[in-house]
Amino acid sequence: MQLQVSDQTCLTWAGDGLVIGVPEGFVPFEGDLANLNTQVSGLLQELIDEAEFTGKEGATAMIRVGQSGPVRKLGLVGLGPDHGITFDTLRRAAAAAARLAKREKCSSLGLSLPVLSANPALTVQAVAEGVLLALHQDTRFKSEDREAGKVKLDRVDLLAMAHQQASLATAEAICSGVILARELVSAPANMVTPEFLAQTALEIGTASGLEVEILDRDQCEALGMGAYLGVARASDLPPKFIHLTYRPASPATRKLAIVGKGLTFDSGGLNIKGSGSGIEMMKVDMAGAAATLGAAQAIGQLKPAVEVHFITAVTENMISGKALRPGDILTASNGKTIEVNNTDAEGRLTLADALVFAEKLGVDAIVDLATLTGACIVALGDDIAGLFTDNDELAGAIIQAATVAGEQFWRLPMEDRYFDGLKSIVADMKNTGPRAAGSITAALFLKQFVQQTPWVHLDVAGPVWTEKESGYNNAGGTGFGVRTLVEWVLTG
Ligand code: BES
Ligand code: MN
Ligand code: ZN
């Protein structure tokens, strides 16, 4: 599929399907819409009447306008009330238009959407992202090609958006990262192993000139990563500690680290996940690592003047005679001792050593992303990630980036008092607190492994997966986090 910006408008474009984004209250027609309605002999009005189309957000309608004119089918996509239109409204509208064109068997789509905030660059970026992400179909594990023989949407023109090629290229780089993350999350744990993620990191590094460092068990041992290696003990698959470095050609303005939780499968360990706990979904437990690698791929293509380290301590959480026992005590690479009172709270153990490693690099800020707690899903649902930090400036920067990127985060308190729940009689701390405030105690646990670097923890357990197609997301892995991370690196 070819996506391009065009200086044609909805009045001049020629092609298969023309789709126009309109807010509520767009009738009676003014300007271009009035002219277009005349051009198609009133069929636009007919479409609205027939479909009872009012411009409600997400609503779509399409009508055939004939064979002789420059356009075969004419469609509308609703943007909702004027005052509520955001870049993510445009992203979702673009997705709805692309899905409509595909459903209506259009081989080309001319897409006309308004420029938001007098910012054509961000408008094109959001619209292009919506199209690319909606059209991404993951059929790797299907034996039959259900698209075979169907009309292919092979061209999308973004109308009245001339001179925005650079934004298109940005969107393409970001979406390549989102799609990589989606596919890593959707693939099963018998394919996406620690070795597979290490290989993926190597490929990203080779393609974009990032430095790649893969530490094996012995090298992690030498660095004292007892918490991470404790989790890795029972798996037959060797752990891989991945560190990619993007260094700009010009002097770096900032130095950042992104750390992702990389559990390719989380059985719970000897505190094995019971029925109803969703153990069969625990291939998604490397979604933080997937977003980290997706961001690395995008950053490697976009080449900002920022040094970025991408880190993930990858392993499985399994059971065997070598498994971590509940009650075992581990020593992390900063010397702190941990009584493992629950082997299912394994993510924080792997992150502990990854955070210590990140801080040693002397970065200006660390962001970690982790499918860390079911409690965060209970608190915020499937669409919103939790954000934890003591640093207001960093919280603001991430939330600002997320707003542009169209991903939702909600800040939860890092209530130091709650660390009492992690007090251990025998060690410096336990890895698991009481049921109440489970996401907060998890964040407080991680805090023990960052000394002074500004750091933010993102609990992404909810939004990394969706059972249903929605907006520009398709069922499966969503690639959540990549867009916010990239936006934060580029602008934050
Ligand atoms: N990987 C899970 C968290 C999770 C749950 C991710 C659902 C995605 C969807 C994590 O390792 C875990 O098991 N957390 C426990 C922590 C508890 C033992 C303190 C949980 O949330 O129950
Ligand atoms: Mn777990
Ligand atoms: Zn886990």
Image (cartoon, rainbow, N blue to C red):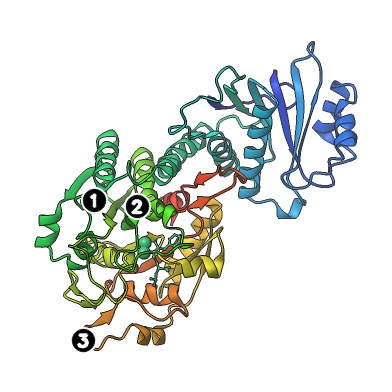
Q: In what quadrant of the picture does the C terminus appear?
A: bottom left
Instruction: Report the Cα–Cα distance between label 3 and label 1.
Output: 32 Å
Q: Are circles 2 and 1 on residues that touch, CB within 8 Å?
A: yes
**Is residue 466 among what the camera can see?**
yes
| Horizontal side of residue 242 vs 301, given as left or right | left
Q: Residues within 10 Å of mark 1 (few under 14, many from 20)?
A: many
Q: Amino acid at mark 3?
A: Val
Q: In the drawing, what numbered circle is on residue 242? A: 1
| Horizontal side of residue 121 vs 93, given as left or right | left
Q: Amino acid at mark 1?
A: Ile
Q: Which residue is mark 2?
A: 289
Q: Which residue is mark 3?
A: 426
Q: Nearer the viewer, residue 145 or 170?
A: 145
Q: Which structural element holds mark 2?
A: helix
Q: Which residue is at a point 32% across and 55% down the rendered structure image?
A: 262
Q: Are circles 3 and 1 on residues that touch, CB within 8 Å?
A: no
Q: Nearer the viewer, residue 158 or 192?
A: 192
Which image quadrant shows ligand 2?
bottom left
| Horizontal side of residue 354 vs 226, given as left or right | right
Could you tell me residue 220's position as x and y percent?
A: 14, 59
Q: Earlier in the sequence, mark 3 or mark 2?
A: 2
Query: Is residue 362 shown above or below 51?
Result: below
Q: Residues within 10 Å of mark 2 (few under 14, many from 20)?
A: many
Q: Which residue is at a point 66% across and 38% down the rendered structure image?
A: 96
Could you tell me residue 109's position as x and y percent?
A: 65, 25
Query: Is residue 414 shown above or below 270?
Result: below
Q: Residue furthest top?
A: 68
